[in-house]
Amino acid sequence: MKLAALLDPVLRLYLRYKKRRRRAEGVLLVSSRGPAEMVFVSAVLSRFMRLAKLDETVTLLCRPDAAGMSFLFPRFLRLYRVDFRRLDDLDYRWKTFIDLHAQHYRLIVSLDYVREHDQDEALIIAADPAETAGMVPPPYKRNYHQRLAESEKVFDLLFDSGPLRQDKILRWSKFADEILDDRQQPVLALLPDSQLPPAEKLPDTVVFFPFSGIRHRQLPVEMWRLLVQAVPEHWQILVAGHPNDFDRNPEYMSLMSLPNVRQETAGFERLASILMGSRMAVGVDTAGLHLAVLLGLPTLCMASAAYAGAGVPYDERVAPANVQFVYVPMECQGCLGRCKFPLVDGMYKCVAEIDTDQVLESVRNAVVRGVF
């Protein structure tokens, strides 16, 4: 534990005598994950917003980069940005904790299944709301009982959301069932028409998402060159990613020398409009690709088997018809990234074994039919 976290008891003693509004009011939802998580959160957010009482506001505490997906959320949802990387800085930590305490929320709900006690849970403790709710932490072999005991001290309601390997939309749906005391069927991972962004007019355009936050899940540039050839020559291909993605993977810049291919580094909000005006999206497990799915765009995902049964591919109960997953089932699938095999040309074994011909055939068929 860092020094800043070790001084939390001193701060809590100070906050005990700090004035704040008398009546606890409002709901704070907490998520410490990145943009991809926010895409999935948008599919269930409407249920958690029902936790607010009449005239109460709902606020989502999230990372600054995750806030880039806020255009997917209802306009009356407030955002509270916290840079979790800076919580080791004592000055930033104390200012954030003092401000959260001053808000005096009635209810704080953690949407995180995996949490850090000295970060997101420490934020909730400092905020000192009237009520708290969270999920039982994952049953890791090491220090599980310690983590469970820590969580029990933080949350008034601690919900057992089920097995470790589980679709996150289903997990959140069950959590919402519990805290709302209202059982509902999980919804498909699609945004309602009212929340769809305007489409940018891009005739015959395909968007590629070759980059992953975990490099071992990326496919070689040669695969993408073959995919370019599978698309009609008069179609436009956008290779989408953050500028840092292209800096870290300079070999992919060779694709931009092809006549119908160009680089796309737009932020998520404009990217959503681009996707709405495109024919299809093809890519690996990454935030932009999941955004394409929720927008209803025909989407092909080349996935590792690491999260099979735990989110990617989606559970059939929430998987919309516009997405197709290509992955190689393995005995070790669902390892959650803890691969026990040596890398194959820099890839996880399950990624290296993805059938190139199957991927190319899927894209060719999609071109002909217009859907997957």
Image (tube, rainbow, N blue to C red):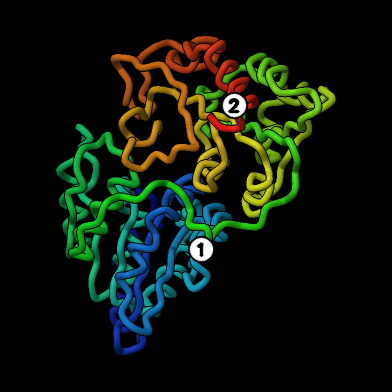
80 in relation to 165, above or below: below
Query: Which disc is residue 223 wearing?
Result: none
SS at mark 2? helix
Q: CA distance from mark 1 to mark 2?
A: 40 Å
Specify the quadrant of the image occupied by residue 245. top right
- Residue that numbered label 2 is attached to: 366
Amino acid under disc 2: Ala
Q: Nearer the viewer, residue 183 or 307?
A: 183
Amino acid under disc 1: Arg
Q: Nearer the viewer, residue 91 or 225?
A: 225
Residue 81 placed where, x, y %? 51, 63
SS at mark 1? strand
Residue at the spot 23% in from the left edge and 71% down from the top edge: 131
152 in relation to 26, above or below: above
Residue 249 placed where, x, y %? 67, 26
- Residue that numbered label 1 is attached to: 81
Q: Could you tell which of marks 1 and 2 lies nearer the N-terminus?
A: 1
Q: Crowding at label 2, few (<14), some or many (≥20) Cα neighbours within 10 Å?
A: some
